Image: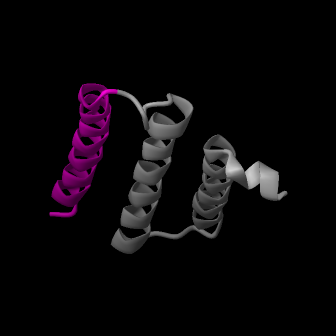
Amino acid sequence: MINTLKNPANRAWIVLMIATGITWYLGEIGAAGTAAIVAMLLIAFVKGRLVILDFMELRAAPLMWRVLLEGWLILVSSLILIAYWISLK
């Protein structure tokens, strides 16, 4: 088990599975409201960042690629959050 956790991709996979379980549970219990939506968007952001850094192997990539892809993730996440905020009005 210790050797498994030494690999960053394995650690990322475990975090992704736990995060998926949390969002599934929130959906299963019918969690609603701003706090639940923001929590799910935050979890989706973390999952996206883990995929970009560990599974696309950009953790050690040139800075330009990291900025480009993480910036894209921040932009899309922000637009979704802004659209949700506007829909509350």
Task: Place residue 5 in its image quadrant.
Answer: bottom right
32, 82: nearer the viewer: 82
Q: Residue at x 36, y 64 (%)?
A: 38
Q: Is residue 72 magenta?
A: yes
Residue at image position (15%, 63%) is 89
Residue 29 spot, x, y in % from top left = 63, 70
Tell me if 2 is positioned left or right of 85 in this view.
right
- The quarter of the picture where residue 41 lies is bottom left
Q: What stretch is highlighted in magenta?
A: 62-89
- The picture places residue 12, in percent across and down from the top left corner, at 60, 48
The N terminus lies in which quarter of the figure?
Answer: bottom right
- Residue 50 in the figure: left or right of residue 80: right
Q: Which of 19 and 52 is in front in this view?
A: 52
**Which residue is depicted at the point 27% across and 46% down?**
80
Q: Say whether residue 43 is magenta.
A: no
- Principal secondary structure, stretch drawn in magenta: helix
Residue toward you, 75 or 63: 63
